[in-house]
């Protein structure tokens, strides 16, 4: 037999009856097969059409020896077949389908059963929508503990720039996570979210929401914005609990952080009339999380340079030094004694002068020029940093690093990540209080979230595949491997998942693919996708994603609405 059934896969043929063909037979659609006693639900992974005409030559002669205006005497038989990957079987058996089975489009109840059967109600998190055969949206649930920990964690989103709407989907997921907390504040999961705005200004406007009744609701009935507007209407007004998501309620918990220079000017694309808070950093702030090495380029960091940075960090922490004083520490302070030629003491440790001079030059360049806007050279003013200790369950913080040098972006990302990891690790072992920034801040860990999700675009910038093991990359890989155990989860996005470190992807519980380039989608990184779904990934419309989630047995095609602030901007431009 050409297409034998398997425990995980079967093939069916499609009726040519027009009434029955109203349901599109295409990769990604969900179907249900039944023999009257057992039901099987699956996802179409590939579709083929065959005819009884064996060759173009046969067709040529059948059309009156090559006359395209002449019909063939007998209409050719055309057979459409589809391959289905099994998601759920009602009798829980792992055996091939045998005998006569009828295949139908899956209804809403069957779709939810396929992807949510093994989930407890209190663990369900909506990650998007599928559609039943009538075109009605069906919420797709995921296991929130497989996204935020402690069982599993992390999401990775890939797709072509501009076409895949990666940031929009990340926002939808974050809104869903925070909406979960608003509905279940007494559950054991108490999440908060931090979003890094790495480029442009889209994330800096997420609090600028339209008037629902005037601007969005009318668009749900027709026109170019019907899909997103109708989905938002469904989420706000019609969907059964606990799946509703209300950005208007979440808006109250959004807080914006932007770099601020010595004159008090905000270094951001966010309009000055909108609320925001500035941040600046002194040497002691960076020494607290051992982030000084981020002031050097990755290629300048070797074991010798890191030893100098470690000694300098200890000096800053113990003696409360400014950046200017820290640079002075690296200058030769006294004549070396016999046997010390070429060696410079920093604290109790000697380092070779060539290494010290190299580190000093790189630090000076970064502090005085590349990052001068938000680093305080001569000041030792604490608490002007991003006040991460004030993060609370249900909060959404947007940190703008888009106008910072690459070093500054890596620095702030690392500082936030290390501080949160430290707080969560202590909270996990029931510690109630801790000190931060030396002894300057008393942190009440009982009020701190027990889950934090961090979204960052261009993940390949922080943890590229190959390219050596830079320290920022090591830290990101460590968070990917161990973050779930303390409740720290990453949502990373990039155009090319094949350019992200393999360990990060291997530790990711949820893989998401939007429209992708054909060359990229053929790489082994996407081997979790069947052939037909890979082909669909190259033609996905905006607002559609293919998701593989650790609590699901098969990938799922999901649709999600465009963020309200972005949808409103498009409507205004058109009008």
Image: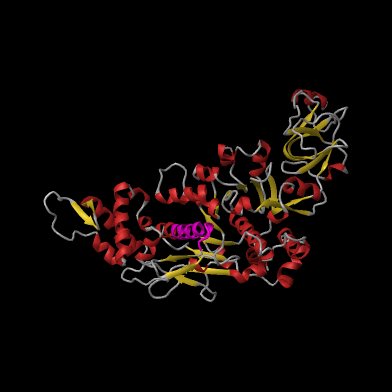
Quadrant of the rendered structure where residue 209 is? bottom right
- Which colour scheme appears in the figure? secondary structure
**Magenta region, main secondary structure:** helix
Q: Residue at left 66%, top 47%?
A: 540
Over which residues does the magenta segment extend? 413-431
Query: Given the current orientation, which residue lies at the most extreme left position?
Result: 338
Magenta highlight on residue 135: no
Asked whether residue 143 appears in the rendered view, the answer is: yes
Question: Residue 573: image x %, image y %?
Answer: 64, 67
Q: Is residue 154 above or below residue 221?
A: above
Q: Nearer the viewer, residue 75 or 168?
A: 168
Asked whether residue 223 appears in the rendered view, the answer is: no
Q: Nearer the viewer, residue 528 or 495?
A: 528
Quadrant of image for the C terminus? bottom right
Question: Residue 254: image x %, image y %?
Answer: 58, 68
Q: Is residue 299 above or below residue 36?
A: below
Direction from residue 404 to residue 202 in the image, left or right: right
Question: Residue 343: image x %, image y %?
Answer: 19, 51
Quadrant of image for the N terminus? top right
Q: Is residue 172 above or below residue 555?
A: below
Q: Nearer the viewer, residue 56 or 77?
A: 77
Direction from residue 362 to residue 79 in the image, left or right: right
Question: Residue 29: image x %, image y %?
Answer: 75, 44
Quadrant of the rendered structure where residue 39 is? top right
Magenta highlight on residue 417: yes
Q: How many marks?
A: 0
Direction from residue 399 to residue 224 in the image, left or right: right
């Amino acid at each position: 037999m050409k297409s034998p059934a398997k425990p995980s896969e079967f093939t069916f043929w499609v009726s040519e009856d027009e009434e029955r063909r109203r349901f599109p037979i295409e990769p990604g659609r969900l179907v249900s097969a039944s023999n009257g006693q057992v039901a099987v639900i699956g996802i179409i992974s590939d579709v083929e059409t065959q005819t009884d005409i064996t060759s173009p030559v046969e067709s040529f002669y059948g059309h009156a020896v090559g006359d395209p205006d002449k019909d063939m005497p007998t209409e050719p038989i055309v057979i459409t077949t589809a391959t289905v990957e099994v998601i759920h079987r009602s009798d829980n058996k792992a055996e091939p389908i045998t005998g006569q089975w009828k295949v139908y489009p899956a209804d809403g109840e069957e779709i939810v059963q396929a992807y949510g059967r093994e989930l407890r109600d209190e663990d369900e998190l909506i990650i998007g929508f599928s559609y039943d055969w009538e075109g009605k949206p069906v919420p797709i649930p995921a296991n929130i503990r497989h996204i935020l920990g402690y069982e599993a964690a992390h999401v990775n989103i890939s797709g072509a720039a501009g076409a895949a709407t990666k940031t929009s989907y990340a926002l939808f997921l974050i809104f869903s996570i925070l909406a979960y907390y608003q509905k279940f504040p007494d559950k054991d999961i108490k999440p908060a979210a931090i979003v890094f705005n790495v480029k442009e200004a889209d994330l800096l406007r997420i609090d600028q929401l339209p008037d629902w009744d005037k601007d969005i609701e009318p668009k749900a009935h027709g026109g170019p914005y019907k899909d997103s507007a109708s989905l938002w209407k469904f989420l706000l007004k019609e969907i059964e609990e606990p799946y509703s998501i209300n950005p208007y309620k979440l808006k109250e918990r959004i807080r914006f952080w932007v770099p601020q220079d010595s004159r008090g000017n905000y270094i951001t694309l966010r309009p000055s009339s909108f609320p925001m808070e500035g941040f600046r950093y002194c040497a002691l702030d960076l020494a607290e999380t051992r982030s000084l090495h981020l002031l050097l380029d990755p290629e300048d960091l070797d074991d010798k340079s890191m030893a100098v940075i470690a000694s300098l960090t200890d000096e800053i922490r113990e003696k409360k030094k400014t950046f200017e004083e820290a640079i002075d520490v690296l200058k030769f302070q006294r004549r070396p004694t016999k046997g010390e030629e070429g060696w410079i003491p920093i604290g109790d440790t000697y380092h070779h002068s060539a290494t010290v001079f190299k580190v000093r030059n790189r630090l000076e360049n970064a502090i005085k020029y590349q990052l001068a806007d938000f680093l305080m050279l001569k000041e030792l003013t604490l608490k002007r940093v991003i006040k991460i200790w004030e993060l609370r369950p249900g909060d959404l913080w947007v940190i703008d690093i888009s106008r910072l040098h690459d070093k500054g972006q890596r620095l702030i990302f690392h500082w936030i990540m290390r501080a949160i990891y430290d707080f969560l690790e202590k909270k996990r072992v029931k510690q109630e209080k801790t000190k931060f920034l030396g002894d300057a801040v008393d942190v009440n860990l009982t009020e701190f979230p027990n889950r934090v999700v961090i979204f960052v675009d261009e993940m390949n910038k922080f943890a590229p595949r190959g390219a050596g093991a830079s320290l920022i990359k090591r830290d990101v890989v460590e968070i990917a491997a161990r973050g779930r155990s303390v409740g720290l989860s990453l949502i990373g996005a990039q155009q090319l998942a094949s350019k992200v470190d393999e360990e990060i992807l291997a530790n990711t519980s949820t893989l998401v693919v939007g429209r992708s380039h054909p060359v990229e989608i053929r790489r082994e990184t996407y081997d979790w996708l069947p052939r037909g779904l890979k082909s669909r990934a190259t033609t996905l419309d905006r607002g559609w994603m293919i998701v593989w989630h650790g609590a699901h047995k098969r990938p799922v095609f999901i649709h999600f609405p465009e963020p309200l602030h972005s949808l409103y901007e498009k409507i205004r431009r058109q009008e």
